[in-house]
Image: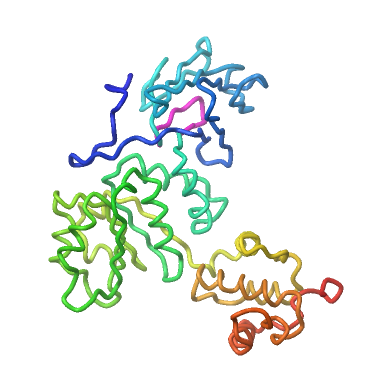
Amino acid sequence: MAPTSPTETYQSSGTYYGTDPITAVRIYGTETEFSLFTGQVAFTLGRSSLCDLRADLRHLAAVHARIERVANREWLRVTDVSSGKNPITFKGRREREFYMRPSDSFRIGKTTFYALSEEMRVARPTAMEVLGARNYTEIDDLLIAAVLDTDRHFVIVAEPGNDQERLGQAIHMASPRRRHPFKVIPPEPKPGGIPYQTVRDARGGTMLIWLPPKRRFDPAALARMLAPEANLRLILCAPSIGKVNASFPPAVVGGAHEIAIPPLRERKDEFPHLLDYWLVSNGSQLRFAALTDQAQQRLRSYEWRGNLQELRVAADHLAQLAHFRSERQATLDTETTRSEIRNWRKRLQLSLPLMPTKHTT
């Protein structure tokens, strides 16, 4: 089970991608993640408080596994030291010792652990924004698929405005393909179609494709993208899987990792978390719970046809307006015009002040 060479790399149609060092182990489908500190070579996993990676799970022994960095710290060697309690399963087989690279996983009892690179961890916040912070399984599946098989395509089914391009960039950056270009094909390319040079320049990398809204994707361009010498991972963005099936062959769609992003109007329970996340990112002291009951209700009942992108704009406006009674006061020191912020507020039917009187300044 040892790697054939300390320098073994991800391979795809003969392209060198390299292997990223593992910096964490995570329990699949949960929020539990164990950092592997840079200066430490070996770690113990188990229920004991003395373990470096401690999980209070009944099917774990006090000290269940020893995890060591090997092969220039790019691989992990996992050894079962549990004296036979609940064997470790790796790639469908019980193993006493095996080697892992990023996205590989093992199972003990009912719990699956998988390895992450730093690039996978950096991609997680974007995935949390787009897919929902508590959709642990979907996020884990996305990160694993991004790295485990670099040839596997992705299909993102969602309405416009759901940060498809940001999610595509996160997939690309988590993958070893990030050493090659990331290109975006808009839904309406320039006259003359997609140039051959565009495909050539993206070789070995990732191409995110917005499917045209009223016609099939250019078959000539598709043939160039699927040619072996192009060696591309495709990320296909469309409002429905039927739209993708109409332009792309089963060989592409059937094996792709599909991601469905619900429209924001179906995710109202995530409003407080999403708004608070973006408000914190903007350095605002405002929180969703501090708004008036009427403002909270208006935000929840609004249709949000622009989805996540429209909600992000709303966070900016709310941060500006929160502590003021008029647009004039709120826009004195900003580039946002009074008419712009007034029109936004009226569209959402929000009344000033947005915070109870006792909280205003």
Q: Is residue 205 above or below residue 215?
A: above
Main secondary structure of the magenta stretch: strand
Quarter holding the C terminus is bottom right
Total labels: the figure holds 0
- Please state the extent of the stretch shown in magenta in the rendering: 103-114
The type of colouring in the image is rainbow
Compared across the picture, whether 21 is left or right of 320 comes to: left
Check the image and name the residue furthest to the right.
Answer: 358
Give the residue drawn at x 60%, y 63%: 278
Compared across the picture, whether 58 is left or right of 291 comes to: left
Give the residue drawn at x 27%, y 73%: 212
Compared across the picture, whether 152 is left or right of 168 comes to: left
Check the image and name the residue furthest to the bottom.
Answer: 339
Using the image as rendered, state which of residue 281 and residue 101 is in the foreground: 281
Residue 350 drawn at (x, y percent): 68, 82
Residue 338 drawn at (x, y percent): 63, 88
Check the image and name the residue furthest to the top.
Answer: 83
Residue 153 drawn at (x, y percent): 29, 51
Quarter holding the N terminus is top left
Q: Is residue 131 above or below residue 69?
A: below
Using the image as rendered, state which of residue 310 and residue 176 is in the foreground: 176
The reply to whether the magenta stretch includes residue 111 is: yes
Give the residue drawn at x 34%, y 66%: 238
Residue 54 drawn at (x, y percent): 61, 26
Give the residue drawn at x 52%, y 52%: 125
Quarter location, residue 242:
bottom left
Quarter location, residue 46:
top right
